[in-house]
């Protein structure tokens, strides 16, 4: 709608700018008329700014002859491009933001992802209505102090640049809710970051940080903290003050211990600490009553505290590649647990109480030292995926027939010479891995698995495949060992299973 204006209420230049920077075509036309009628006011300088902005933009367009050579060539449509609340320059390879961008004070959202920026001009500080600024995947080494003028900013994304420091002015952005600085070269965060009391997400992963300032205690609204892939050897005790934290990622650092104050994070839902050097967990881990995901793989844990059983809402527990020889009996208290992954440890047995994990659907205890199959596993009637590969098992109990919901069973890398009759009861089984055992004859129990889709037999001593394999109507993939299965036998099997894909390993 055409804006009415009264020259007595506002001076002509101000009114001209208001009309010129409007997203409404009619208003821009009025502004152009004002400029022509008032040459003495030198309003052309503002039009020249649009020429510069357009020509910067036009260099990225595929259409030829898009440059505006002079003011007479400037059209309303050129101006309207820059008069919207949102401006997306991403992937345009502009390399430089012209100083004239300072005139776009109406901008609320500016996307400058991957445009080849090496410098962010100080004029960006004039964009005081910005609530979102995206600068990811550029080559910025520093931010201008004027960034602190963007006091309405709620989201700032500067991931994958070359920043080595943040200026103290970052503390002026008190409305900021999301700050992403991952994949830079930061060695420290300024104390002023603690002034960002509205911040909900802070991402500084993949930098060179060794510590966090004590002032992070001021981030009382923080819900997500990503400090993974840095050089932390300890976490500050102040981390325990982040009482609203839900997601904490500290993976791929050099942590040997966790502060006991981590137990104060009672709203925490996901905790990722894999790829560190943890030798123990604090007993306070048991106070994390909201925790659902706990990733502890690739550390140096030799035991778990009994308090782990108090984390009653835990759904996923990952303990792969540690030094565990046993699990605490209290693990049976994790009634909500759905996935338990403990491969590549030194377990020789499982606690009897593990049979209480009735919601468990995935159990991976491969690459341990279990010489006998833990009978308590057969009580986990909700189990869908079971991996006991590489344990040196010589037999399986017939009670395995109780795992009626099992869809994937990995028995590879053991010393099995036969399979129990109960295996035939696993009618939902789709994937059976028997590689590298000591089978000389394919057990008849396999032929009863009517829903089997994938069967791995490589690394055994089979020389022939019985015709009964044709009972596996849904079989899609069959893996066999080169050298023991002759080409003639392979061709015979292929004719029996015309809809099956074969892979023969050397």
Image (spheres, rainbow, N blue to C red):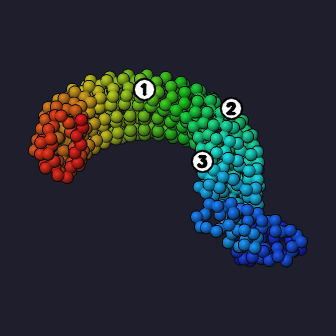
The numbered mark at residue 220 is: none
* Number of numbered tags placed on the structure image: 3
Does the residue at mark 3 contact the one at mark 1 (Cβ under 8 Å)?
no
Q: Where is residue 498 in the image (x, y as percent from the top left)?
A: 17, 52
Left or right? Give the position of 483 relative to 323.
left
Q: Position of residue 365 (x, y in %)?
A: 34, 31
The residue at the point 74 percent across, 50 percent down is: 121
Q: Indicate the quadrant where residue 463 lies.
A: top left
Number of other residues with Cα within 10 Å of mark 1, as a class: few under 14, some 14 to 19, many 20 or more: many
* Position of the C terminus by quadrant: top left
Name the residue carrying label 3: 137
Q: Distance between the residues labelled 2 and 1?
A: 31 Å
**368, 334: nearer the viewer:** 368
* Secondary structure under the numbered disc 2 in the rendered image: helix
Does the residue at mark 2 contact the one at mark 1 (Cβ under 8 Å)?
no
Residue 24 visible from this viewpoint: no
**246, 44: nearer the viewer:** 44
Q: Position of residue 371 (x, y in %)?
A: 26, 23
* Secondary structure under the numbered disc 1 in the rendered image: loop
The numbered mark at residue 214 is: 2
The residue at the point 33 percent across, 31 percent down is: 366
Disc number lying in front (2 or 1): 1
The residue at the point 74 percent across, 53 percent down is: 124
Residue 165 visible from this viewpoint: yes
Upstream in sequence: badge 2 or badge 1: 2
* Secondary structure under the numbered disc 3 in the rendered image: loop
Upstream in sequence: badge 3 or badge 2: 3
Q: Where is residue 391 in the image (x, y as percent from the top left)?
A: 29, 27
Name the residue carrying label 1: 322
* Position of the N terminus by quadrant: bottom right
Does the residue at mark 3 contact the one at mark 2 (Cβ under 8 Å)?
no
């Amino acid at each position: 709608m055409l804006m009415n204006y009264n020259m007595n209420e506002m001076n002509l230049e101000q009114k001209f700018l208001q009309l010129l920077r409007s997203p409404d075509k009619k208003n821009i036309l009025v502004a152009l008329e004002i400029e022509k009628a008032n040459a003495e006011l030198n309003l052309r300088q503002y039009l020249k700014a649009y020429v510069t902005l357009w020509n910067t933009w036009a260099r990225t367009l595929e259409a030829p002859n898009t440059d505006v050579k002079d003011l007479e060539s400037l059209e309303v449509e050129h101006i309207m491009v820059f008069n919207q609340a949102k401006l997306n320059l991403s992937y345009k390879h502009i390399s430089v933001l012209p100083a004239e961008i300072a005139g776009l004070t109406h901008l609320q959202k500016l996307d400058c992802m991957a445009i080849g920026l090496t410098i962010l001009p100080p004029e960006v500080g004039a964009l005081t209505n910005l609530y979102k600024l995206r600068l990811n995947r550029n080559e910025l080494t520093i931010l201008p102090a004027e960034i602190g003028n963007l006091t309405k900013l709620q989201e700032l994304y500067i991931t994958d640049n070359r920043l080595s420091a943040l200026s103290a002015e970052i503390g002026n952005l008190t409305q900021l809710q999301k700050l992403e600085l991952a994949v830079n070269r930061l060695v420290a965060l300024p104390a002023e970051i603690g002034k960002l009391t509205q911040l909900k997400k802070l991402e500084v992963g993949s930098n060179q940080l060794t510590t966090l300032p004590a002032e992070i205690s001021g981030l009382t609204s923080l819900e997500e903290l990503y400090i993974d892939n840095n050089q932390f050897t300890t976490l500050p005790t102040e981390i325990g003050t982040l009482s609203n934290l839900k997601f904490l990622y500290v993976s791929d650092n050099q942590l040997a211990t966790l502060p006991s104050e981590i137990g104060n994070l009672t709203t925490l839902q996901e905790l990722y600490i894999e790829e560190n050097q943890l030798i123990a967990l604090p007993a306070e881990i048991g106070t994390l009553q909201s925790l659902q995901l706990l990733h502890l793989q690739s550390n140096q844990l030799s035991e778990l505290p009994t308090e782990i059983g108090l984390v009653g809402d835990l759904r996923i527990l990952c303990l792969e590649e540690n030094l565990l020889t046993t699990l605490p009996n209290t693990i049976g208290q994790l009634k909500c647990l759905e996935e338990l992954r403990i491969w590549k440890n030194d377990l020789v047995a499982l606690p009897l109480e593990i049979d209480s994990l009735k919601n468990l659907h995935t159990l991976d205890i491969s690459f341990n030292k279990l010489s006998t199959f833990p009978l308590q596993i057969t009580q986990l009637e909700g189990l869908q995926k079971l991996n006991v590969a590489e344990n040196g098992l010589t037999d399986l109990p017939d009670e395995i027939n109780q795992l009626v919901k099992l869809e994937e069973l990995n028995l590879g890398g053991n010393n099995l010479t036969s399979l129990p009759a109960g295996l035939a009861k696993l009618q939902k089984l789709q994937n059976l891995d028997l590689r590298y055992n000591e089978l000389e004859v394919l057990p008849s129990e396999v032929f009863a698995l009517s829903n089997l889709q994938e069967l791995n037999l490589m690394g055994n001593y089979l020389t022939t495949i019985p015709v009964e394999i044709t009972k596996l109507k849904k079989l899609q993939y069959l893996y066999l060992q080169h050298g023991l299965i002759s080409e003639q036998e392979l061709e015979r099997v292929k004719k029996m299973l015309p809809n099956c894909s074969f892979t023969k390993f050397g």
